[in-house]
Image (cartoon, coloured by chain):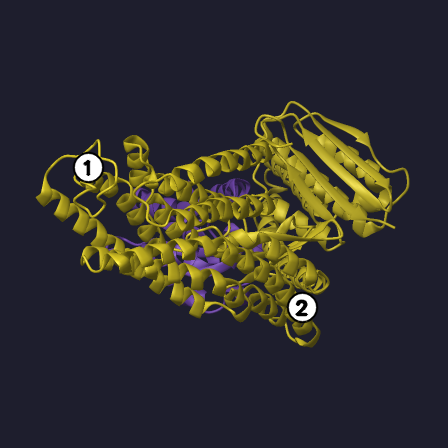
Chain colours: A purple, B yellow
Amino acid sequence: MEKSVLIVDDHPSFRASARRMLEADGYEVVGEAEGGRAALTAAERLRPDLVLLDVRLPDIDGFEVARRLLDANVRTPQIVLISSQDSIDLGEAIGASGARGFIPKSELSAGAITSLLR
Amino acid sequence: MTNLRRAQIGLAVLAFVIGIGVLLVVINGEHNTHRGAYAALSLGIGWGFIGTGLYVWRRRPGNNIGPLMTAVGFSGFLKALAFSNSSVVFTIGSLGGVLIYAFLVHLLLSFPSGQLKGPLDRLLVVVTYVNTTVVQLAAFVFTDPAKAGCAHCPANPLLINHSKAAVVINAAQMDIAIALLGAVVAVLYRRWRGSTPSQGRAYAPVLAVGSLTFMLLMTELIVEQANLSSTLADGLTLALFGSIACLPFAFLVGLLRSRFGHAEAISSLVGRLGGGEGRGALRNALAEALGDPTLQLAYWVPDRDAYVDAEGRPRRVDPAPKGKIATTIDHDGRRIAAIVHDADLAGERDLVQAVGAAAALTLENERLDAELRAHIDELRASRARIVTAGYAERRRLERDLHDGAQQRLMALGINLRLARDRIERDPRQTAELLDASLQELSEATGELRELGRGIHPAVLSDRGLDAALKGLAGRAPVPVELVQTPDDRLPSSVESAVYFVVAEALTNVARYAQAQTAKVSVVRRNGQVEVQVSDDGVGGADPEQGSGLRGLSDRVSALDGRLDLTSVAGEGTIVRARIPCG
C-alpha cells in the first residue's frame, strides 16, 4: 500500500521537486502546506502516514509543528524533519521534537526517507 | 511721524489746556478752603504725571507704565473738577475723581515691567476698578454733599434721598478701599524685599512714595469714616495731594536708577564672566544679572535650524514654556542664542538684550561648544544606527539567500538525483527533470545576481556611476530621465553612496509616489557632489517615516554629507544629497 505524504515547506519550487521525487518512488503526496498552521490543519484533515516537515517556516517553526502533531490524541503521522541547515546547527532540538529523523535538504532522496522509516 | 507720536503730542496739548481749565476751576471753587495749595497740587499731579508718563511712553513704547502714568495725570485733573461750583462739573469730578486711585494701584503693582505679576495683583486691580467706578456711582447717588460735611458744595443732581442706603454703601466702599490699600502696601513691601539689590534701588523711591500715598489715603478714609476732626481730615487730604504730586518724580528717579541698575547689572555680569568656570557659569551669571534664577539658555545650531541646550540636546524655545519668554541674542548679525526668562521681564527686554549683548562673546563660545556636543551626539546615534543597520542587512541577506537561491539549489539537487536514478529506465522523464533543473538554475543565478547588486553593484566598480545609474533607471518601473552624471570617476565611497541614494529614492518613487516620471541628476561642483532625485507624484512624504531614508542619511552623514527631503503634498518629492568630494 502506498504511503500518504504531506509536504510542508514555504518554497513552492522545493515542494514541486519533493513531490516529483516522492511520487516517482511510489509515495502518494496527499497535500502540501507552506506554513506551520496550514500544516496542522492539513494533517488533521488528510491524516497522512508521513509528514515531510521543513524546520524553518514563516509562522510556527517545524519543531513546534512536530510537537503539536505528536501531542494530538489521534493517529499520529511519522514525521521527517528537513532543513537547508546541517543537523549540527539544529542540535538537540531534532531529538527533542519526537520526529522520526532528520534529513538535510542537500541529501534528500526517496531512498533516504525509506531508510529512515525502515 | 508715527500715529503714536501724533497721539502723544495731542495728549500733551490737551493736558496743557485742561490744566489751565482745572486751575481756573480750583481757584474759583467756593467750597475750597485751600484754593492756592490745591490749585498748585492739582496742576502738579496732572502735568507731573502726564509729562513723565508721555516721556516714559515715548522711551518705552512697549511698556504700560507710560500710558498708566498719563491716565493717572488725567484722572488727577478729573478729581480736581470736584472743586467746581457748577453742579454738573462737581458731579463729574466727584464721580470720576476716585479713578485716580485705581490707576495708581494698577501703576504701582505693575512697576517697572508694566505687567501685573500674578492672580493676586490682578484681583487687587480689578476690585479697585470696580470700587472706584460701579461702587462709587452707587455710593454717590445716595450722598448729599451738605450732609456729608461740605456745606458749600453744589447740590448732587443724581441724589436719591435714602440715608440708610447712603450709610451702608459708603461704609462698604470705604471698608473695601481700606482693605485694598492695606493689601497693596503689603504686596509692594514684599516685592521690595524680594528684589535684587539693583532692582531694589530702582523700586525704592516709587514703592516708598507710593506706599506713603496709600497709607495717607487709608488714614484719611479711616478719619473720614470715624467722623474725627475735620481739620485733621483737611490736613491729611492736603498731605495726600502732596504725596501724589511727588509720585511722578519718584518714578523718574526709579527709572533713572533702573538705567543705572542696568549698567550695574552689565558691569557685574562682565566681572563674573571673566572668573566663571564650568558649563553652568554663564547661565548663573546671566540669572544673577537679570534677577531670574529660573533663567535658561538655548544655543542656536544653524545646520539644524534649531536650538540646543548646553549639553547639545534639542531644546524648544518657540513657544516658550508657560510663564516664560525667549529673547533672541544676535552677534555680528547672526543669531547665536536665546535667553529663556521669566515673563515678568517682558518690560525689561532692553535690559535682557543689553545683558545678552555684553555676554555675546562668551555665549558664542558656549554655542560652539554646545554645537559640537550636538554633533557628537548625532554622530554617536548615527554610528549606532549604522551598526544596527549592518546587522539588519546581514539578517536580510541570510533570509534572502535561504528563501531564494538556496531553496532553488536544494530543489535542483533533488531533481538531479532523481534524474541520475531514472536516466536508464526513463530517458524521457529524465529529460524533463533536467529541463526543470536548468530552469531552477537560471532562477537561482538571477536571484544571486540581484542579491549581489544589493550588496554592491559590480557595474558600479567596473564601469562607473553613469553605467550603474543607467542600469537603475532601466530597471525602474517608472520612466526615469537621467539628466546629468559626472564625466570622471569619483572616490568609490562617494560613488557607492550616490548609487544607493538614487536606488532608494527610485524605490520610494515606485512604491509610494504614484508618479508618471522621475528625474535623476548628479553634479560635481564646488568640492562636492550634488545628487537630486525628483518626481511628479503625490508628494507629502514624511522624512521621519521609514528606515530607508534614515539609513541613507546616516550613510551620507558618514561622508560629512547631508540628505534633505522636500515633499509638499501635491507637488512631488525631491531628495537631495550633498556629499563632500574634494
Q: Could you tell me which residue is drawn at 70 percent across and 39 percent down?
A: B503
* Three-letter code, disc 1: Val
Left or right, B263 with reference to B340: right
Q: Chain of mark 1?
A: B
Q: Earlier in the sequence, mark 2 or mark 1?
A: 1
- Image location (x, y in percent) of residue B565: 65, 39
* Three-letter code, disc 2: Ser
Give whichever of B135, A46 is nearer the camera. B135
Q: Is residue B389 above or below residue B433?
A: below
Dot 2: element: helix
User: In the rendered image, which residue does mark 1 sit on?
Assistant: B141
Which corner quadrant of the image does residue B348 belong to?
bottom right
Q: Answer whether residue B484 is visible to the viewer in this image.
A: yes
Q: Residues within 10 Å of mark 2 (few under 14, many from 20)?
A: some
Q: Residues within 10 Å of mark 1 (few under 14, many from 20)?
A: some
Q: Could you tell me which residue is drawn at 53 percent across and 67 percent down?
A: B201
Q: Chain of mark 2?
A: B
Left or right, B75 with reference to B180: right
Which corner quadrant of the image does residue B188 belong to?
bottom left
User: In the rendered image, which residue does mark 2 sit on?
Assistant: B267
Q: Are marks 2 and 1 on the same chain?
A: yes
- Image location (x, y in percent) of residue B317: 55, 52
Q: Is residue B59 above or below residue B520?
A: below
Give whichever of B79, B279 is nearer the camera. B79
